[in-house]
Amino acid sequence: GHSQWAVALASQLACCLPPAPRRRAGRAPPRRSAPHQARADPDTMDLDLLLSTALSAVTLAAYVHTLCPGTPGGDAGELLQVALELGIAHPPGYPLWTMMAHGFSRLPLRNTTAAWRVNLSSAVYGALAAGTLSLGVGSWSGSPWAGVAAGGAFAFSPLVWEYSVQCEVFALNNLLCAAMLLALLRFDARRTVGRAGAGAFAVGLALSNQHTAVFFGAPFALWALLAGRTALLRPAPLLLLAAAGLAGLSPYLYLVARGGESAAWGSWGETSTVRGFLTHVLRLEYGTFRLANTPAATDAEFGLRLRRFSESLS
């Protein structure tokens, strides 16, 4: 995915609170609001939502106008077949993407092909990702226009645009990572168990699409547990968070249901058994921490890739 710079961009756009007023003699010092409370202006929030929705609409129009009319290269042919037949894609299976793409393939849109309709799903995910990122950055920074700038720069960057107009899993990954960021910001604004549970569900859902989401979900979850430890580090809240995370991971049950002897033609793996399921989900045939099944292509570059990822967040 290409959305890892969203956190860094959002932090750079965040506004600082004004200095505390001078204390007057004989009066108690005024109580300052916490940083996350100072941005809860209802009018600003309404403008955030309005501008983010408008950005999503403009982005979707641009994506649809440039939508790939057929099947592009790469994994698109396999993914399209899997989506149409409800099969099982290459590891880790991409169950959430498959089920949603199948739904798009059945939309009653006249004079369109199944490939075009599945490509349309990426356009929708990409447009929603831009709007969600805009909403998060705008609410965090206190400037709706900063949110639009961040969301727009993200939406129309070359690689993001490229994968938002074709049959691929990356646009949905962008949307789910943006949703995790927004959930984190909402939790920061009001640190309740319910909002933490929404974030845990978003993390699980993101991991049911693409494993690289762990690079967002893990630090987000760790920060939330530390920041909200008074409310969260108790048995009942922890059970709720675990249940929410497992609910987000529930699309993986699709692999069990669609595996076995009745699996669609061209499906990967044997996911109806425990061993086969774990082999597929953990990408053991590729190597869990490899990006491909050719060791020389990735092993020597792992340190370089990790360093570049870390630098992109600074």
Image (tube, helix red, strand yellow):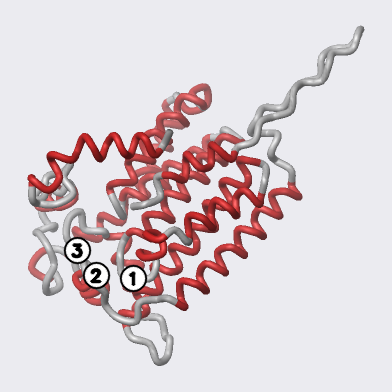
Residue 52 drawn above or below residue 275: below
Element at label 3: loop
Answer yes or no: is residue 86 visible: no
Relative to 194, is 106 on the left or the right? left
Relative to 268, is 96 on the left or the right? right
Element at label 1: loop
| Residue found at the far bottom of this picture | 111
Residue picked out by circle 1: 166
Mark 3 Cα-neighbour bin, 10 Å: few <14, some 14–19, many ≥20: many
- Residue type indicated by callout 2: Ala
- Residue type indicated by callout 1: Gln
Residue picked out by circle 2: 76
- Residue 243, quarter of picture: top left
* Sequence-first tag of 1 and 2: 2
Circles 1 and 2, Cβ within 8 Å, touching? The answer is yes
* Sequence-first tag of 1 and 3: 3
- Residue 298, quarter of picture: top left
Residue 244 drawn above or below residue 101: above
Separation of residues labelled 1 and 3 (CA atoms): 16 Å
